[in-house]
Image (cartoon, rainbow, N blue to C red):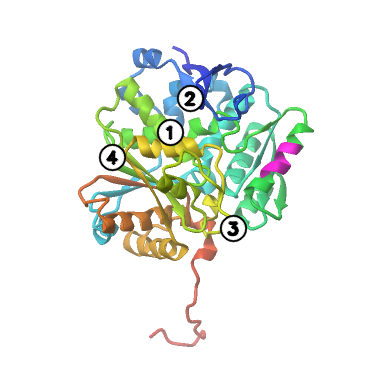
Amino acid sequence: MTFSSLSHLECSRDGSRHDADVVQGTSPLGAPLLARYDLAQVADTVTPAQIAARPPTLWRYHELLPVRDPAHVVTLGEGLTPLLDLPTHGARLGVPRLRMKDEGLVPTGAFKARGAAVGVSRAKELGVRGIAMPTNGNAGAAWAAYAARAGMDALIAMPVDAPEITRRECVVTGAELYLVDGLIGDAGALVKAAVARRTGYQDTATLREPYRIEGKKTMGYEIAEQLGWRCPDVILYPTGGGVGIIAIHKALLELQELGWITGDLPRLVAVQAAGCAPIVDAFDAGLTESTPPADPYTVAFGITVPKALGDFLVLDAVRSTGGTAIAVTDEQLLAAQVALAQDEGTWVCPEGAACFAAVGQLRESGWLDGTEDVVVLNTGTGLLYPDTVPVDVPTLAKDGVIP
């Protein structure tokens, strides 16, 4: 039995085939490359029951991941995060069958660890010496951690406004970190130029290498497995670069082809902040690609991506599943963050909170009728964004009295 059934890479625009066993970036068209597998071989060699008996990490799905030799797996125990029922908050929103896939519990505190684990593992297997990437914070922190685990170098550039904790995560793991007075696209241009001057480095920016998406698609596998190999009706995902929603869609299509799930796929909902909502604007206008907003800003810094390389893939995932795209204001998402914490005791990141605000809006509009099985992806712990919660409480004298 082979560890991976990886077959080849495929251009997401023209479907052309490319060699999966050399270091690759984007296709000749400048489009993301997607990993393809011999799914017939997988169906013949493994069953869902066998997977269920494996250790509780994302590597339980190794036949559907790109690392060919288990000796090259770089892991910190990532994956199989809980799928939590949210009865109190669901009742508040009028969606009693509301659940949350909580990615705040993976290493480095955000779902980015999934993409880093698989991306770094495959880079190591292909002989890459150092990874380099722009980031809004969490991805850089994750890739720096996994690069350290793999004994690789890491070059990270992030906007100066990125969450401070993510700087510290990069520094403590020994990454070469630079702050950029600009947005993630500006950081990306600097990284691209640096990689061109460095031997053995790979540009691992969002969708500019093929394997980050493979780590993140395991969220889709886990949701199906945790629901008994069935799909929820709706999945909401906070959308910046769009890898998460693209990845979940890819996972569901693979599971469908394997015959491990049947019926309609979940309606996928791309959630953005009103201050940076190019995907929502393109969806509403019926376009297949997005246009960057003039002055993007949101407290949900992780989804401040003015122009996603895979925007056309996000829009296809949403439309092909009968989903939608929706934007919420910073005020709405911050209020949702507090309401969820008070209802259920869980402090989610502002990006995840945007999805809960969106659930409320979709229920009010009637797009959700309240009978659906709804899963929200919380992409990170709120502890990464402490400044989103102001603290104004009384200080007592040591001989004072608590009222």
Which amino acid type is shown beneath numbered disc 3? Asp
Q: How far is the residue under mark 2 from the one under mark 3? A: 38 Å
Q: Looking at the image, is mark 4 or mark 3 earlier in the sequence?
A: 4
> Chief secondary structure of the magenta span?
helix
* Residue linked to disc 3: 295
Q: How far is the residue under mark 4 from the one under mark 1? A: 16 Å
Q: Nearer the viewer, residue 7 or 285?
A: 285
| Residue 318 counted in the magenta span | no
Q: Looking at the image, is mark 2 or mark 1 earlier in the sequence?
A: 2
Q: Residues within 10 Å of mark 1 (few under 14, many from 20)?
A: many
| Magenta residue span | 188-193
Q: Is residue 68 left or right of residue 245?
A: right
Q: Nearer the viewer, mark 2 or mark 4?
A: 4
Which quadrant holds the N terminus?
Answer: top left
Q: Is residue 20 left or right of residue 62?
A: right
Q: Looking at the image, is mark 4 or mark 1 earlier in the sequence?
A: 1
Q: How far is the residue under mark 3 from the one under mark 1? A: 34 Å
Q: Could you tell me residue 293's position as x and y percent?
A: 55, 53
Q: Nearer the viewer, mark 4 or mark 1?
A: 4
* Residue linked to disc 1: 218
Which amino acid type is shown beneath numbered disc 4? Pro
* Residue linked to disc 4: 232
